[in-house]
Amino acid sequence: PTLWRKLHDEALARAEAGLAKTPSWIRGYEADPRLIQPGRNNIERAGLSDWIKVYQGEVATFEPRPDQNQKGLVICNPPYGERLGDEASLLYLYQNLGERLRQACLNWEAAVFTGAPDLGKRMGIRSHKQYSFWNGALPCKLLLIKVTPDQFVTGERRTPEQRQVERENPVEVEVVERKLNKNGNPIKPEPVVVEQARLSEGGQMFANRLQKNLKLLGKWVRREGIDCYRVYDADMPEYSLAIDLYHDWVHVQEYAAPKSIDPEKASARLFDALAAIPQALNIDKSRVVIKRRERQSGTKQYERQSAQGQFLEVSEGGVKLLVNLTDYLDTGLFLDHRPMRMRIQREAAGKRFLNLYAYTATASVHAAKGGARSTTSVDLSRTYLDWARRNLSLNGFSDKNRLEQGDVMAWLQANRDEYDLIFIDPPTFSNSKRMEGIFDVQRDQVELIDLAMARLAPGGVLYFSNNFRKFVLDENLGQRYAVEDITAQTIDPDFARNGKIHRAWKITARA
């Protein structure tokens, strides 16, 4: 008892002395909104509410207090894999943590407790001390870090204006290195020495058209900071191709020639075009990817075409997205929906966003960037939801962004939540084994929109779009809801040559 009283009195004396000092301000961040209040309750029970504040925030956006900009300490225990789901997501989380420390906490110290020390190296800052611990049966390390330029792997502080975005190769995903200028836009790579092939007369005409299109789109592309756009869309009937630029890569889709066209002539024209593309666009031929696009049935358009696993990081509207130019017919980013994604980003602040037939959840990333209160993305494909998770993690967004695997129609029937902003971009046709029955957008549009409108909060907005060229919106929908055709507002200059690329409507409840 004597020893206990002595230790107890010493502890009280230290506590009183500490409380008498100028308080050290402690700020905590947690991405999951469900954990914020329990944390605050614990702080209040401990009597520390005046010193410790907890906020909801992502690792990519946390900020020190203005009066703490000289010196501070960041302590972090990142997920070990269970919460984010795969190594690729964790890779981006650690990279975002390292970037944020370099940007906002220069000359601070950091302590990172991790069960994945190899990923700790991806922060781009050396640790000056490491301690080994066990978290239950899991070996862990505590990395002590001085956030000073001499500890940066790059040897200098990277700022948003200067940083080079480095994405190394995780197990499943290879990310191609990018560079950004001071405005955050991609830097055009050093001019490549493009092997000059002798072009046929038709090939030269095709090259001239590509260069003309580049010139026409150039001013708009530079003004808007566009990284990926369509430069050619079957402008010349004899060259039936869609050509998209993804930073310094070219994605070519050959539309299957009708049976009336001589296959040998079609093949010769394709070779003419492939010879012209690298010269006209000044891109090495090794960075030209070609696919044949035919009428798709069922889930064929989503089936794997290759297994190279190479992902390229691109930017759009202030967010970073992953595209795959080789493995699937589509790349993971529908370029024609760019204006819709930007609209969602502008309107998402403080709203609950629902993304149906979410694909790789690019619209959800934009909503999160725009300050959405939460995002929910629903898709039947586990492959694309994993891709969606990587897109969200790449931008520092994590737990408050739900990813739901399921048949959209069945999910809507079971769901009872409300949403302020809903985006629906359904396939024309789907007959997956994981869903009951067959989905046909023309036949099932009314049921789909009715189910979604039942989940729309008062004052909310639903955007409905699809790419079926023969689609006709059911007139009964216009009698039940306020429906506005906004297609013209959702077509950017690179798709202006093809006004039927998609249709889009804004739907709200009638007053």
Image: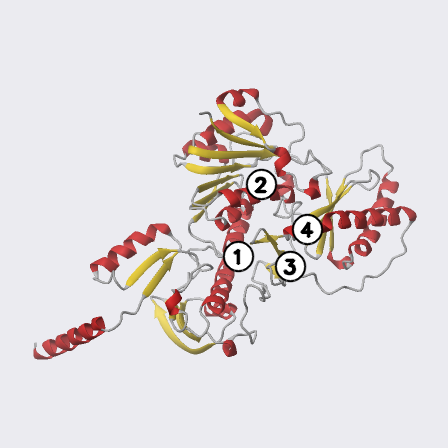
Vertical side of 81 occupied by 118: above or below: below
Q: Is residue 326 visible?
A: no
Which badge, 3 or 4, comes first in the chain's sequence?
3
Q: Secondary structure at mark 3?
A: loop
Q: Nearer the viewer, mark 1 or mark 2?
A: 2
Give the labeled residue for mark 3: 186
Q: Residues within 10 Å of mark 3 (few under 14, many from 20)?
A: some
Which badge, 3 or 2, comes first in the chain's sequence?
3
Drawn side of residue 313 relative to residue 416, left or right: right
Q: Position of residue 315 (x, y in %)?
A: 60, 54
Q: Amino acid at mark 3?
A: Pro
Q: Nearer the viewer, mark 3 or mark 4?
A: 4
Q: Position of residue 211 (x, y in %)?
A: 80, 50
Give the labeled residue for mark 4: 221
Q: Secondary structure at mark 2?
A: helix
Give the labeled residue for mark 1: 394
Q: Which mark is residue 340?
A: 2
Alpha-carbon span between mark 4 and mark 2: 17 Å
Q: Position of residue 450 (x, y in %)?
A: 48, 27
Q: Amino acid at mark 4?
A: Val
Q: Secondary structure at mark 4?
A: helix
